[in-house]
Image (cartoon, rainbow, N blue to C red):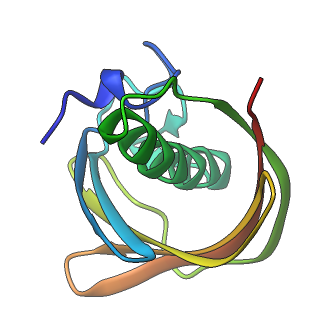
Amino acid sequence: MDNILDLIPQRAPIVMVDEFLGIEENVSRTRFTVREDNIFVDGNIMSECGLIEHIAQSAAARVGYIFKSKGESIPIGYIGSVNDFAITDHPKTGDVITTTIEVIQEVLSITLIQAHCVVGDKEIATCRMKIFLNQQ
């Protein structure tokens, strides 16, 4: 797929998505390998904040892919809210997180998503996130 830096506005050291895996209708997927030098990793464990940022960037990659494929400028998105965040396990250094973003609702420039993060076959985190796009 595309270079992830072509799809998201973030740059090192805060890039939290390695690969955009694709999109089908209202569902997209990303992948991220947790590295020891990540700013959200302490003692080989990634924090909740790191997972939330990863989810937000996974949603941003979806938007970036859609706008780039239409030849349009990619808008900047902002987290409006995070709801029902549940974490069952913290990812560790070397873990590969695969995240599914499902669009629940889109109204004007507001998108509500449901995110599911897995490591292997184990779901480690879920949440709903409201994202606002700045489309100027």
Q: Nearer the viewer, residue 89 or 123?
A: 123
Q: Is residue 7 left or right of residue 20?
A: right
Q: Position of residue 100 (x, y in %)?
A: 40, 72
Question: Compared with residue 41, is residue 31 higher up or lower down, i.e. above or below?
Answer: below
Q: Is residue 42 above or below residue 24?
A: above
Of residues 74 and 2, the one nearer the viewer is 74
Q: Is residue 83 above or below residue 12?
A: below
Q: In the image, what residue occupies the spot 54% across and 82% down?
A: 88
Q: Position of residue 119 (x, y in %)?
A: 28, 72
Q: Is residue 60 left or right of residue 80?
A: left
Which of the 4 quarters of the picture holds residue 29? bottom left
Q: Return the x and y of residue 123 as percentages of the image width and height.
A: 40, 84
| Residue in the picture at 55% in, 35% down | 40
Q: Quadrant of the C terminus?
A: top right
Query: Would residue 55 appear left or right of 127 to someone viewing this image?
Result: left
Location of residue 122 by image quarter = bottom left
At horizontal 78% and vertical 51% (from top left) the residue drawn is: 109
Q: Which quadrant is the N terminus positioned in?
A: top left
Between 77 and 88, the one lying in front of the other is: 77
Q: Please name the residue shown 30% across and 40% down the image.
A: 69
Residue toward you, 24 or 96: 24
Q: Position of residue 135 (x, y in %)?
A: 74, 31
Which residue is farthest left? 1
- How many tags in the picture? 0
